Image (spheres, rainbow, N blue to C red):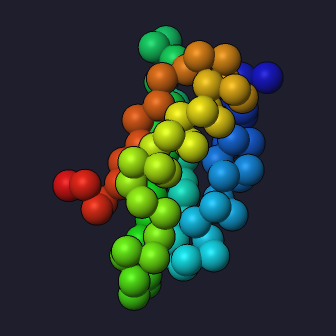
């Protein structure tokens, strides 16, 4: 398995955490050399941004899942609420 394949699987496992609130997660980039995975929170059409999992909590859960599933890969979580 490649890092990209494992990252896609991790994102698929995590998506239900935010889909119930109308948001989604997407795999945006995988850098095999640096073992960095970029996942983005998609808020298109979300009417209640406060209803989506809080940014710090989401970061913690996604980072733990990436660490567990991808063996120490570095996570970059792009959350438009923090821009």
Q: Residue furthest left?
A: 83
Query: Where is residue 83 drawn, in percent x and y?
Result: 20, 55
Q: Is residue 49 above or below residue 55?
A: below
Residue occupying the point 39% across, 54% down: 55
Residue occupying the point 49% across, 51% down: 58
Query: Where is residue 34 drawn, in percent x and y?
Result: 45, 14
Q: In terms of depth relative to the viewer, which is nearer, 2 or 24?
A: 24
- Answer yes or no: is residue 28 visible: no
Left or right: 54 as drawn, with respect to 19: left
- Answer yes or no: is residue 13 visible: yes
Residue occupying the point 69% across, 26% down: 68
Q: How many marks?
A: 0
Query: Where is residue 1 drawn, in percent x and y?
Result: 79, 23
Left or right: 47 as drawn, with respect to 72: left
Query: Where is residue 20 drawn, in percent x and y?
Result: 63, 76
Q: Residue furthest bottom?
A: 47
Q: In terms of depth relative to the viewer, which is nearer, 46 or 7?
A: 46
Left or right: 72 as drawn, with respect to 77: right
Q: Residue furthest right?
A: 1
Q: Is residue 52 above or below residue 56?
A: below
Q: Is residue 60 above or below residue 26?
A: above
Q: Is residue 72 above or below residue 24?
A: above
Left or right: 15 as drawn, with respect to 78: right
């Amino acid at each position: 398995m490649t890092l990209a394949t494992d990252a896609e699987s991790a994102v698929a496992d995590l998506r239900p955490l935010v889909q119930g609130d109308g948001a989604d997660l997407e795999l945006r980039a995988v850098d095999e050399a640096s073992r960095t995975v970029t996942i983005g929170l998609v808020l298109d059409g979300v009417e209640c941004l406060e209803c989506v999992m809080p940014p710090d909590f989401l970061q913690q859960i996604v980072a733990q899942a990436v660490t567990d599933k991808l063996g120490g890969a570095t996570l970059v979580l792009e959350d438009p609420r923090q821009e």
